[in-house]
Image (tube, rainbow, N blue to C red):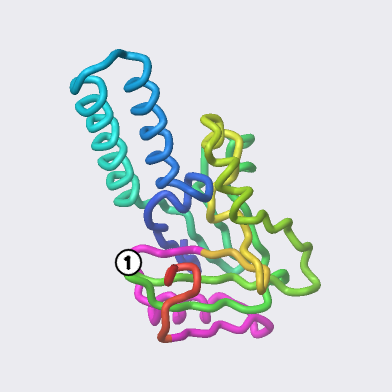
Amino acid sequence: MPGTYRAVVKGSYGVLPRGFPWIFAFWYAAMAAVFGLEAGSGPMFWVVLPAVFVLTGTALIYRVQQRKAAAFTADAMGIWLGVQWKEPRRDRRKRAHIPWSQIQEIRISPSPAGSAVDIVLSGLAPQPRVKPAAAAWLQALLPTSTFLQRPAILEPLADPVRYHAPLFGARSSEVAQALRALAPATVTVTETTSLSAADAR
C-alpha cells in the first residue's frame, strides 16, 4: 500500500512476552533437574539426560533468536505494533495501534541487527501501565504466559514512557527517512548514532 512502511522485528520480541527466549533455559533446566532426581541414579540420569535437556534448550533459544516477525507498520494514521492475526480476538491481544496524535517523538538508533525504534508517547496521551521488569520475568515463568501475556513489543518501557521496536535488517537512516515522510509536523523524528539503551543491555 502506498504511504506505508513495514519492517520485521528480530527474535521473539514481536510475538512472545518479555523474558523470552531466555525463559526456555529455565524451563529446560527445571525439567533436567526433575528427571535427574526422579528417574534414578548413575551417570545416565545425572549427566546424560540433563545434558540432553540443556542442549535442547540452547538449540531452541538459538532458533527463536533467528526468528523474524512482521510486527512494525507505519502509515498516515500512526504506527501498528505486533503481528496481525486472522482471529479478531487474538489480534486485539497481540497487536496495538498508536495514532500519531499520541506520539511525541520517535527516536531511531542503530543496533547490531539493524536499527531500534523508540516511540515516545505524548504526555497528553493515555498512559499505559509500565510493568516492572522483575514482574514481567516472573509472569513469563508460567507455562501459560505465551498465551495470556502480550508480546514484548506491546509492553511499554519507562523514563520516558515509550514502546521499543528492534527492527531487523533496516538501517537507521532508512527508517528515519520513511517515518519522517509519514509523521505529521507535531512528531519529532530523531536519528542517533549510538545504540539505544534497550539494545545496549
Is the residue 148 above or below the residue 156 in the image? above
Q: Quadrant of residue 120?
A: bottom right
Above or below 170: residue 19: above
The vertical placement of 186 against 114, above or below, is below
Q: Is residue 94 visible?
A: no
Residue at x 34% of width, y 28% of height = 32
Question: How many marks on residues?
Answer: 1
Picture coordinates of residue 28 (x, y %)?
Answer: 37, 33
> Which residues are the magenta region?
165-192
Which residue is located at x 37 percent, y 15 percent?
38
**Residue drawn at the location 72% of the way across and 71% of the way down:** 101
The picture places residue 143, in percent across and down from the top left corner, at 52, 30
What percent of the width, then of the height, locates residue 27?
Answer: 42, 34
| Residue under pointer 1 | 113
Task: Tell me which amino acid carries mark 1.
Answer: Ala
Which residue is painted at 49% across and 48% down in the image? 83
Compare residues 75 and 55 and report the one nearer the observer.
Answer: 55
Q: Nearer the viewer, residue 162 or 106?
A: 162
The answer to which quarter of the image holds residue 8 is bottom left
Q: Quadrant of the C terminus?
A: bottom left
Q: Residues within 10 Å of mark 1 (few under 14, many from 20)?
A: some
**Horizontal and vertical percent for residue 189?**
55, 82
Residue 27 visible within the image: yes
In-image side of 21 versus 41 (left or right)? right
Answer left or right for 27 relative to 84: left
Residue 170 among magenta residues: yes
Q: Quadrant of residue 157?
A: bottom right
